[in-house]
């Protein structure tokens, strides 16, 4: 993955999200050691301190745990944690923006729901 | 441990101050970016740290000692810039021999590999190298010496874009393998920012800001929208940069300390909020010009 | 990263090796000076009408040829230039402080002058051989030097004279670097009289060394003068920044 340096999302947040995706895709499983800050720094060409900040987000969110002198490991039920948080935070924020725009354009609930269903149908067709 | 400590540092040349009341503390084993416009005092500060310049006032300590005329400092520090003057009688391979002799942590393998990769001719004299090649060679010298304090003063002068990218990547990789304090100065931040841990802004001989790069990126926020709306909500003091987009529209960058209430107010009135890129912000903060370039062309 | 703690003498040793690599042209200069001198001596000794003022006088005192005089000039000028800004800049890239730099310069001067001395001795012998070959033996050529003790004394005296010239050159060089005005003053008050007067005022100075009949005293006088000159140099250039 190439980081988007122009994005308004800070680099360390992008790092945290990339790690979450790795966990969700079963690239790294429970109690397995995750990339060190130095591996991440090398991988993404960023300062190790920035990478550490990304890792710390996941520690604070209960996705990773530290073992002294050994590094960081994936917690049990990390996937559920990630999904829950993404739903409560990211998705809710997106919905909030969506609803705000819908209000602005005077799109009522029914129409909005229809639009959502339409998109879901399209996606199913694709896959 | 703080590796560099400057207290109220002054350096006066004839009538002009190159450094004025500069105070800064740098922690060890970090990559620090020193950003400022040409003439802001970057080189004077770095040469003072490298023990090549005697300050006219204040105090400077590097590794806890006065750097001027200090053998221990000299053995643990390398200062690299594009003005490095080697003997006109030494070929590149001889300079490498000398460097290996002087620097305890010198890594010959790294030097040789980089010399090979960048295509520096070992049998050239230093002054025969093109500007970009000379900068590349100097940078290699700085990397391979692995000094506990490594100073790069505008190291990429004359380098091609791809060489600059390669150099910064090499710098990062070698830093990861062998952590040490690295100060890189530049008047441009964008190519450098991802490998930095901290940023120091210097303007008119003063340190005006010293932050972690992540905090720096969130230091300011950009607002664009109706001039009157923005001016009614935003306090004039916090404006970092202002640019007229049209008669009624304006873009401003402000300190990121707006209250929730202000933010909601601005959003409701159609003001767009964007993050301010670190490179732009450093430019806004270190700018010494009066107004903007557009003002020059405004009919009075 | 742990810090290295260099000791002064190991740095001086490294700096000397570095200078040895950096200043190859110093010895090219020596060769050129001596070749010119050899040409001069061959024809100069033959015509014996060269007007060099006090120099002529002293040349006859010591070796009787120009090789010695030109090598003294070489020793003087390389030492004036040794601590010049370009060289200080080159030193500064690597490990140095003012003590190690001066000491390495002194070591360089001593070694360079040893080489200078060897070449003076061989070149002046060579000149005399050629002179005999061209002009035959005449009464003016002095061969007393070419006994073992004679050679030794010739060697010692030449060497210490070179050291004297070098240390004076080193001092004058450092004084000149104190500022443009001082540089101008040095050129005016040292260079001016050398060119525009008969230099007779220098005779006592040279007699001070040249008239000394004891080799030991001669060496002591020169060593003291040289140490004084180099001591003054370190004092003068103590706070000098490289720019």
Image (spheres, coloured by chain):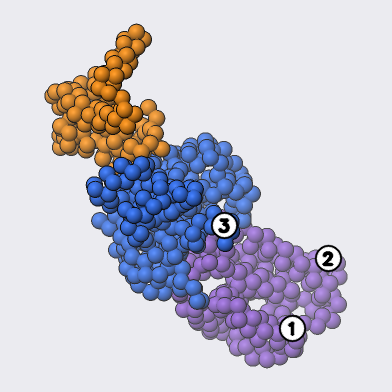
Chain colours: A orange, B blue, C purple
Pointer 3 local density, CA inside 10 Å: few below 14, some 14–19, many at least 20: few
**N-term-proximal mark, 2 vs 1:** 2
Which residue is the site of mark 1?
A: C195
Which residue is the site of mark 3?
A: B298
Identify the chain of the residue marked 1, using the numbered disc in the image: C
Q: Residue at x 52, y 37 (%)?
A: B162
Kindly report the distance in space between the C-alpha atoms of the residues bearing marks 2 and 1.
36 Å
Find residue B297 and name its label.
none
**On the image, which quarter does residue A9 sit in?**
top left
Identify the chain of the residue marked 3, using the numbered disc in the image: B
Locate the C terminus of chain B and report the quarter of the image it occupies: bottom right
Q: Are marks 3 and 2 on the same chain?
A: no
**On the image, which quarter does residue B26 sit in?**
bottom left
Identify the chain of the residue marked 2, using the numbered disc in the image: C
Q: Mark 1 and 3 residues: CB-CB less than 8 Å, in contact?
A: no
Find residue C133 and name its label.
2
């Amino acid at each position: 993955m190439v980081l988007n340096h122009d994005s308004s999302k800070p680099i360390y947040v992008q790092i945290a999200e990339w790690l979450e995706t790795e966990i969700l895709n079963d690239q790294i499983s429970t109690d397995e050691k995750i990339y060190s800050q130095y591996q991440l720094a090398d991988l993404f060409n960023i300062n190790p301190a920035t990478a550490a900040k990304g890792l710390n987000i996941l520690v604070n969110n209960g996705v990773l745990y530290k073992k002294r002198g050994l590094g960081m490991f994936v917690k049990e039920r990390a996937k559920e944690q990630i999904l829950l948080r993404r739903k409560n935070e990211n998705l809710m924020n997106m919905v909030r923006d969506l609803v705000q725009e819908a209000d602005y354009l005077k799109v009522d609930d029914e129409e909005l729901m229809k639009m959502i269903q339409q998109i879901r149908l399209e996606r199913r067709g694709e896959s | 441990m703080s590796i560099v400590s400057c207290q109220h540092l002054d350096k006066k040349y004839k009538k002009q101050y190159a450094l004025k009341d500069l105070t800064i503390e740098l922690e060890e084993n970090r990559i620090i970016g020193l950003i400022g416009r040409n003439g802001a005092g970057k080189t004077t500060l770095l040469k003072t740290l490298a023990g090549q310049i005697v300050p006219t006032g204040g105090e400077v300590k590097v590794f806890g000692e006065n750097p001027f005329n200090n053998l221990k400092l000299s053995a643990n520090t390398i200062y690299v810039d594009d003005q490095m003057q080697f003997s006109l009688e030494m070929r590149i391979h001889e300079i490498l021999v000398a460097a290996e002799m002087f620097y305890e942590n010198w890594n010959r393998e790294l030097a040789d590999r980089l010399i090979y990769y960048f295509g520096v001719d070992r049998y050239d004299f230093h002054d025969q190298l093109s500007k970009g090649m000379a900068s590349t060679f100097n940078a290699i010298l700085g990397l391979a010496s692995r000094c506990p304090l490594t100073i790069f003063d505008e190291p990429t002068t004359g380098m091609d874009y791809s060489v600059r990218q390669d150099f910064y990547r090499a710098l990062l990789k070698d830093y990861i393998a062998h952590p040490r304090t690295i100060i890189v100065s530049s008047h441009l931040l964008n190519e450098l920012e991802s490998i930095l841990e901290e940023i120091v802004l210097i303007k008119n001989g003063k340190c005006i800001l010293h932050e972690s790069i992540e905090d720096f990126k969130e230091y300011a926020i950009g607002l664009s929208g109706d001039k009157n709306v923005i001016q009614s909500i935003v306090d004039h003091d916090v404006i970092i940069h202002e640019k007229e987009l049209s008669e009624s529209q304006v873009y401003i960058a402000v300190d990121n300390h707006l209250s929730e209430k202000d933010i909601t107010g601005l959003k409701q009135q159609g003001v767009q909020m964007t993050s301010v890129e670190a490179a732009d912000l450093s430019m806004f903060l270190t700018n010494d010009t009066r107004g903007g370039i557009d003002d020059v062309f405004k009919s009075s | 990263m742990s810090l290295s703690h260099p000791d002064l003498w190991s740095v001086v040793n490294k700096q000397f090796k570095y200078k040895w690599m950096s200043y190859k042209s110093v010895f090219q200069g020596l060769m050129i000076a001596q070749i010119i001198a050899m040409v001069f001596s061959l024809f100069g000794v033959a015509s014996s009408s060269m007007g060099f003022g006090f120099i002529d006088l002293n040349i006859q005192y010591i070796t009787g040829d120009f090789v010695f005089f030109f090598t003294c000039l070489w020793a003087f000028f390389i030492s004036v230039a040794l601590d010049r800004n370009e060289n200080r800049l080159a030193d500064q890239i690597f490990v140095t402080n003012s003590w190690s730099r001066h000491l390495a310069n002194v070591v360089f001067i001593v070694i360079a002058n040893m080489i200078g001395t060897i070449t003076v001795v061989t070149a002046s012998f060579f000149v005399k051989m050629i002179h005999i070959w061209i002009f035959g033996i005449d009464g003016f050529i002095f061969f007393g030097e070419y006994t073992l003790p004679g050679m030794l004394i010739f060697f010692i005296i030449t060497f210490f004279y070179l050291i004297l010239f070098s240390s004076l050159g080193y001092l004058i060089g450092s004084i000149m670097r104190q500022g443009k005005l001082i540089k101008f003053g040095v050129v005016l008050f040292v260079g001016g009289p050398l060119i525009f007067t008969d230099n007779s005022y220098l005779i006592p100075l040279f007699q001070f060394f040249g008239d000394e009949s004891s080799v030991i005293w001669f060496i002591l006088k020169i060593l003291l003068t040289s140490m004084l000159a180099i001591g003054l140099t370190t004092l003068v250039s103590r706070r000098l920044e490289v720019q």
